[in-house]
Amino acid sequence: MRIDLIITDRCIQEGRLPPLEAVAPYVDRLQLRLKHQTALLTFQLGARLLETGWKQEQLLINDRIDIARALGCGVHLPERGMSPPLVRRHSPYVRELGVSVHSLASAHEAQRLGADYVTFGHVYATPSKPGLPARGVDMLRQLVTVLSIPVLAIGGVSITNLAEVAAAGASGVAVISAILQQPDIEEAAHRLWIVGKSLRGEGMSI
Protein backbone atom coordinates (compact mmCIF):
# COMPACT_ATOMS: atom_id res chain seq x y z
CA MET A 1 0.00 0.00 0.00
CA ARG A 2 1.42 3.34 -1.07
CA ILE A 3 1.93 5.96 1.64
CA ASP A 4 2.11 9.65 0.74
CA LEU A 5 3.09 12.21 3.35
CA ILE A 6 1.79 15.74 2.83
CA ILE A 7 3.73 18.73 4.11
CA THR A 8 1.52 21.80 4.67
CA ASP A 9 2.25 25.38 5.68
CA ARG A 10 1.72 24.43 9.33
CA CYS A 11 4.75 22.17 9.13
CA ILE A 12 7.09 25.00 8.17
CA GLN A 13 8.87 26.66 11.09
CA GLU A 14 11.00 29.71 10.31
CA GLY A 15 11.40 28.58 6.72
CA ARG A 16 12.47 25.08 7.69
CA LEU A 17 10.98 21.64 7.25
CA PRO A 18 10.60 19.13 10.08
CA PRO A 19 13.36 16.45 10.21
CA LEU A 20 12.08 14.21 7.45
CA GLU A 21 15.17 12.14 6.66
CA ALA A 22 14.12 9.55 9.26
CA VAL A 23 10.76 8.86 7.59
CA ALA A 24 12.09 8.57 4.03
CA PRO A 25 12.41 4.75 4.10
CA TYR A 26 8.72 4.40 5.00
CA VAL A 27 7.14 6.98 2.70
CA ASP A 28 6.56 6.43 -1.00
CA ARG A 29 5.85 10.06 -1.91
CA LEU A 30 6.37 13.37 -0.16
CA GLN A 31 4.05 16.14 -1.30
CA LEU A 32 4.83 19.80 -0.63
CA ARG A 33 1.42 21.47 -0.36
CA LEU A 34 2.56 24.96 0.55
CA LYS A 35 -0.19 27.38 -0.36
CA HIS A 36 1.14 30.37 1.59
CA GLN A 37 4.86 30.16 0.92
CA THR A 38 6.75 31.96 -1.81
CA ALA A 39 7.75 30.12 -4.96
CA LEU A 40 11.39 30.65 -4.03
CA LEU A 41 11.02 29.08 -0.58
CA THR A 42 9.03 26.14 -1.96
CA PHE A 43 11.75 25.53 -4.53
CA GLN A 44 14.48 25.83 -1.91
CA LEU A 45 12.71 23.38 0.40
CA GLY A 46 12.25 20.92 -2.45
CA ALA A 47 15.89 21.25 -3.45
CA ARG A 48 16.94 20.69 0.15
CA LEU A 49 14.90 17.47 0.26
CA LEU A 50 16.66 16.21 -2.85
CA GLU A 51 20.04 17.12 -1.35
CA THR A 52 19.29 15.15 1.81
CA GLY A 53 18.47 11.89 0.05
CA TRP A 54 14.89 12.12 -1.19
CA LYS A 55 14.59 11.02 -4.82
CA GLN A 56 12.95 13.02 -7.58
CA GLU A 57 10.42 10.24 -8.11
CA GLN A 58 9.41 10.51 -4.43
CA LEU A 59 8.74 14.23 -4.50
CA LEU A 60 5.47 15.91 -5.52
CA ILE A 61 4.78 19.64 -5.66
CA ASN A 62 1.20 20.75 -5.18
CA ASP A 63 -0.18 22.94 -7.96
CA ARG A 64 3.10 24.70 -8.87
CA ILE A 65 4.02 23.10 -12.17
CA ASP A 66 6.91 25.52 -12.66
CA ILE A 67 8.57 24.37 -9.42
CA ALA A 68 7.93 20.69 -10.17
CA ARG A 69 9.53 21.16 -13.58
CA ALA A 70 12.53 22.97 -12.11
CA LEU A 71 13.07 20.20 -9.56
CA GLY A 72 12.42 17.39 -12.03
CA CYS A 73 9.74 15.84 -9.85
CA GLY A 74 6.00 15.13 -9.95
CA VAL A 75 3.04 17.46 -9.52
CA HIS A 76 -0.26 17.10 -7.67
CA LEU A 77 -3.13 19.24 -8.92
CA PRO A 78 -6.11 20.54 -6.94
CA GLU A 79 -9.55 19.58 -8.21
CA ARG A 80 -10.07 22.98 -9.82
CA GLY A 81 -6.46 23.39 -10.91
CA MET A 82 -4.89 23.22 -14.36
CA SER A 83 -6.01 20.32 -16.50
CA PRO A 84 -3.63 17.36 -16.89
CA PRO A 85 -3.41 17.76 -20.72
CA LEU A 86 -2.37 21.40 -20.32
CA VAL A 87 0.29 20.45 -17.79
CA ARG A 88 1.66 17.69 -19.99
CA ARG A 89 1.68 19.95 -23.02
CA HIS A 90 3.84 22.56 -21.32
CA SER A 91 5.75 20.24 -18.96
CA PRO A 92 6.08 16.93 -20.81
CA TYR A 93 8.80 15.67 -18.48
CA VAL A 94 6.82 15.93 -15.24
CA ARG A 95 7.41 12.54 -13.61
CA GLU A 96 3.97 11.91 -12.12
CA LEU A 97 0.67 13.75 -12.19
CA GLY A 98 -1.98 13.34 -9.51
CA VAL A 99 -5.29 15.10 -8.98
CA SER A 100 -7.39 15.69 -5.87
CA VAL A 101 -11.03 14.69 -6.32
CA HIS A 102 -14.10 14.89 -4.11
CA SER A 103 -16.78 13.20 -6.19
CA LEU A 104 -17.30 10.39 -8.67
CA ALA A 105 -17.79 12.88 -11.48
CA SER A 106 -14.52 14.72 -10.84
CA ALA A 107 -12.69 11.40 -10.48
CA HIS A 108 -14.00 10.24 -13.87
CA GLU A 109 -12.91 13.54 -15.39
CA ALA A 110 -9.42 13.34 -13.89
CA GLN A 111 -8.96 9.86 -15.29
CA ARG A 112 -10.31 10.88 -18.70
CA LEU A 113 -7.86 13.78 -18.83
CA GLY A 114 -4.88 11.57 -18.10
CA ALA A 115 -4.16 11.72 -14.37
CA ASP A 116 -1.76 9.02 -13.18
CA TYR A 117 -3.66 8.69 -9.89
CA VAL A 118 -6.22 10.52 -7.76
CA THR A 119 -6.57 11.26 -4.07
CA PHE A 120 -10.13 11.05 -2.79
CA GLY A 121 -11.52 12.50 0.41
CA HIS A 122 -12.00 13.43 2.96
CA VAL A 123 -12.90 9.84 3.77
CA TYR A 124 -13.14 10.30 7.54
CA ALA A 125 -13.89 13.29 9.74
CA THR A 126 -10.82 15.43 10.15
CA PRO A 127 -10.00 18.65 12.04
CA SER A 128 -8.63 20.13 8.82
CA LYS A 129 -12.18 20.12 7.37
CA PRO A 130 -14.31 21.38 10.29
CA GLY A 131 -18.05 21.23 9.75
CA LEU A 132 -17.81 19.25 6.52
CA PRO A 133 -19.25 15.72 6.58
CA ALA A 134 -16.90 12.90 5.63
CA ARG A 135 -17.52 11.31 2.25
CA GLY A 136 -17.07 7.87 3.72
CA VAL A 137 -15.65 4.49 2.86
CA ASP A 138 -18.68 3.47 0.77
CA MET A 139 -18.06 6.28 -1.69
CA LEU A 140 -14.37 5.41 -1.74
CA ARG A 141 -15.32 1.84 -2.63
CA GLN A 142 -17.60 3.04 -5.44
CA LEU A 143 -14.89 5.24 -6.86
CA VAL A 144 -12.28 2.46 -6.78
CA THR A 145 -14.71 0.17 -8.59
CA VAL A 146 -15.28 2.49 -11.54
CA LEU A 147 -11.74 3.83 -12.04
CA SER A 148 -8.80 2.04 -13.63
CA ILE A 149 -6.15 4.35 -12.17
CA PRO A 150 -4.94 4.15 -8.55
CA VAL A 151 -7.01 5.84 -5.85
CA LEU A 152 -5.44 7.14 -2.64
CA ALA A 153 -7.62 7.83 0.41
CA ILE A 154 -7.10 11.09 2.28
CA GLY A 155 -8.70 12.75 5.27
CA GLY A 156 -8.70 11.33 8.78
CA VAL A 157 -6.76 8.26 7.70
CA SER A 158 -4.72 6.68 10.49
CA ILE A 159 -3.18 3.39 11.49
CA THR A 160 -6.48 2.42 13.13
CA ASN A 161 -8.53 2.59 9.92
CA LEU A 162 -5.88 1.63 7.37
CA ALA A 163 -7.29 -1.89 7.05
CA GLU A 164 -10.77 -0.52 6.28
CA VAL A 165 -9.38 1.74 3.56
CA ALA A 166 -7.45 -1.16 2.04
CA ALA A 167 -10.53 -3.38 2.13
CA ALA A 168 -12.37 -0.70 0.15
CA GLY A 169 -9.76 -1.17 -2.58
CA ALA A 170 -7.64 1.96 -2.13
CA SER A 171 -4.15 1.74 -3.58
CA GLY A 172 -2.76 3.81 -0.75
CA VAL A 173 -3.24 6.74 1.56
CA ALA A 174 -2.14 10.34 1.86
CA VAL A 175 -1.62 11.47 5.44
CA ILE A 176 -0.48 14.40 7.53
CA SER A 177 -1.33 13.99 11.21
CA ALA A 178 -0.96 10.18 11.18
CA ILE A 179 2.78 10.85 11.03
CA LEU A 180 3.55 14.48 11.72
CA GLN A 181 1.36 14.94 14.78
CA GLN A 182 2.71 11.89 16.56
CA PRO A 183 5.32 12.12 19.36
CA ASP A 184 7.88 10.17 17.32
CA ILE A 185 7.41 10.70 13.58
CA GLU A 186 9.90 8.01 12.62
CA GLU A 187 8.14 5.41 14.73
CA ALA A 188 4.73 6.54 13.45
CA ALA A 189 5.88 6.28 9.82
CA HIS A 190 7.46 2.89 10.45
CA ARG A 191 4.30 1.49 12.07
CA LEU A 192 2.15 2.83 9.24
CA TRP A 193 4.53 1.26 6.71
CA ILE A 194 4.44 -2.12 8.48
CA VAL A 195 0.63 -2.18 8.51
CA GLY A 196 0.47 -0.93 4.93
CA LYS A 197 2.93 -3.58 3.79
CA SER A 198 0.79 -6.30 5.38
CA LEU A 199 -2.23 -4.95 3.49
CA ARG A 200 -0.72 -4.77 0.03
CA GLY A 201 -2.87 -7.70 -1.05
CA GLU A 202 -6.06 -5.87 -0.04
CA GLY A 203 -5.89 -2.78 -2.22
CA MET A 204 -4.36 -2.32 -5.65
CA SER A 205 -0.70 -1.58 -5.10
CA ILE A 206 1.18 1.01 -7.12
Image: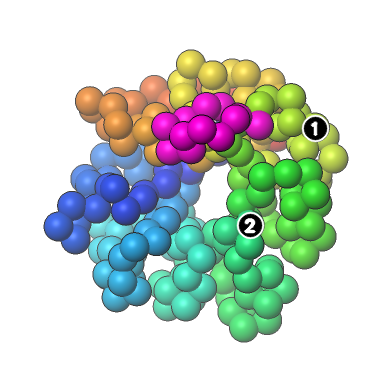
Q: Percent from the top left, x then y, of residue 182?
A: 28, 27
User: What residue does disc 1 label?
Assistant: 142
Residue 129 in magenta? yes
Disc 1 vs disc 2: which is toward the camera?
2
Residue 126 in magenta? yes
Query: What residue is rendered at 51% in x and 73% in y?
Result: 65
Instruction: Please give the label number shown on residue 153.
Output: none
* Total marks in image: 2
Separation (CA) of disc 1 from disc 2: 19 Å
Q: Percent from the top left, x then y, of residue 130?
A: 46, 34
- As shown in the figure, which amino acid type bears the numbered disc 1? Gln
Query: What residue is rendered at 42% in x and 43% in y?
Result: 5
Seen from the viewer's position, the closer of residues 80 and 93 is: 80
Q: Is residue 186 visible?
A: no
User: In which quadrant is the C terminus drawn?
Assistant: top right
- As shown in the figure, which amino acid type bears the numbered disc 2? Glu
Seen from the viewer's position, the closer of residues 167 and 202 is: 167
State whether residue 67 is above or below residue 148: below
State whether residue 188 is above or below residue 115: above
Q: Percent from the top left, x then y, of residue 159?
A: 46, 21
Magenta part, dominant SS: loop
User: What residue does disc 2 label?
Assistant: 79
Residue interval drawn in magenta: 124-135
Q: Is residue 179 left or right of residue 195?
A: left
Q: Secondary structure at mark 2?
A: loop
Q: Quadrant of residue 33?
A: bottom left
